[in-house]
């Protein structure tokens, strides 16, 4: 069974006004072409999952479950399966958003000591994402991410017989569970921003890790951006002062659907969040007749 596959029904390239080749560009083995993964050549590094803005890459591992488990650790430690059978398949799936979600709450450690020799592309990606996250953490007075080598395991002589078998059975149980999942044929979707949405993070603290938007005067409140946003990042709400476009920045993946489909070209995405997430807009009343449908917008898919 394949390590990963792409659900083309959710791929960004299915939508009008959007073009995306992020998974193809980042794949170190160049095994992704036209939305398809050459399964026998995939090494399960997870980089395609990390960069997909739609969560369209499916994997054998349930990352949501794994990260919930890591969040609950007293001293979170990120490792790959070469270090621990309960670790991630590969650390390539980690993004600055995932790292922030874990490191902003309590000090985070990561063992990436094998990455450079095992998968250089993953090592390069991790260096970039960890640096960005640590910089944001420093601005908030939070401890940076610590890179720690694998700690040597205790020798059998230092472990009691009962403890040894307890650890052995736990490890065996996890392996059996992993094998059962892989053979079941179930593939899981994962979107890194879901971790931030679940934690209700403060966007102001991690502004350098998020994108921003600009809404121009040409906006007439047609609500198309609100309707087509796949992650519910945009919402038009009435206030006493008038209509406001609310931007839930922690949910935005910079997919570009809002910008690419705005009929007035009034919305633009910026690479860094400037702290602005509420925009006053003017709602234009438009004439409607039985045969007049120019104000009805639909998200077309290929």
Image (spheres, helix red, strand yellow):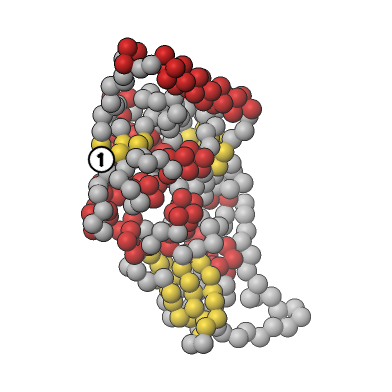
**Residue 47 is drawn in which quadrant?**
top left
Tally of numbered discs:
1
Question: Which quarter of the figure is the N terminus placed in?
Answer: top right
Figure check: 159 above or below 274: above
Q: Which x, y percent locates residue 34?
A: 52, 39
Left or right, 213 with respect to 295, comes to left
Residue at (37% x, 62% y) in the render: 203
Residue 89, picture quadrant: top left
Residue drawn at point x = 33 percent, y = 58 percent: 206
Secondary structure beneath label 1? strand
Residue nearest the observer in this picture, 141 or 7: 141
Lateral position of residue 126 relative to residue 174, left or right:
left
Q: Does residue 99 sit above or below 173 in this rendering?
A: below
Query: In front: 152, or 23?
Result: 152
In percent of width and height, residue 38 lies at 51, 29
Q: Residue furthest right?
A: 290
Looking at the image, which residue is at 36% across and 36% down? 78
The residue carrying mark 1 is 146
148 and 217: which is toward the camera: 148
Horizontal side, residue 76 vs residue 296: left or right: left
Answer few, some or many: residues within 10 Å of disc 1's Cα (few below 14, many 20 plus, some between 14 and 19).
some
Residue positioned 42% across, 20% down in the render? 163
Residue 201 appears in view: yes
**Residue 128, image x and y in percent?**
28, 44
How far across and down, in percent of the image, does residue 301 sit? 62, 54
Q: Is residue 39 visible?
A: no
Residue found at the very far top of the displayed protein: 157
């Amino acid at each position: 069974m394949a390590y990963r596959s792409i659900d083309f029904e959710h791929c960004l390239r299915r939508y009008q006004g959007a073009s995306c080749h992020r998974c193809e560009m980042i794949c170190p083995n160049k095994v992704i072409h036209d939305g398809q993964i050459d399964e026998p050549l995939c090494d399960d590094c997870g980089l395609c999952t990390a960069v997909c803005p739609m969560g369209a890459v499916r994997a054998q591992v349930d990352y949501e479950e794994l990260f919930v488990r890591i969040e609950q650790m007293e001293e979170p430690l990120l490792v790959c399966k070469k270090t621990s059978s309960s670790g991630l398949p590969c650390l390539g799936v980690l993004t600055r958003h995932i790292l922030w979600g874990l490191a902003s709450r309590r000090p985070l450690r990561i063992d990436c000591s094998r990455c450079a020799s095992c998968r250089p592309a993953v090592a390069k990606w991790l260096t970039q994402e960890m640096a960005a996250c640590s910089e944001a953490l420093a601005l908030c007075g939070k401890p940076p991410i610590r890179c720690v080598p694998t700690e040597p395991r205790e020798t059998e002589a230092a472990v009691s017989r009962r403890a040894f078998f307890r650890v052995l059975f736990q490890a065996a149980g996890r392996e059996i569970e992993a094998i059962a999942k892989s053979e079941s044929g179930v593939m899981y979707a994962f979107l890194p921003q879901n971790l931030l949405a679940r934690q209700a993070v403060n966007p102001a603290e991690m502004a350098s890790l998020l994108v921003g938007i600009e809404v121009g005067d040409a906006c007439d409140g047609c609500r198309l951006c609100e309707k087509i946003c796949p992650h519910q990042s945009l919402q038009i709400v009435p206030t006493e002062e008038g209509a406001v476009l609310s931007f839930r920045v922690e949910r935005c993946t910079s997919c570009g659907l809002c910008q690419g489909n705005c009929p007035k070209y009034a919305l633009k995405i910026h690479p860094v969040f400037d702290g602005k997430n509420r925009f006053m807009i003017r709602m234009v009343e438009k004439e409607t007749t039985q045969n007049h449908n120019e104000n009805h917008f639909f998200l077309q898919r290929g």
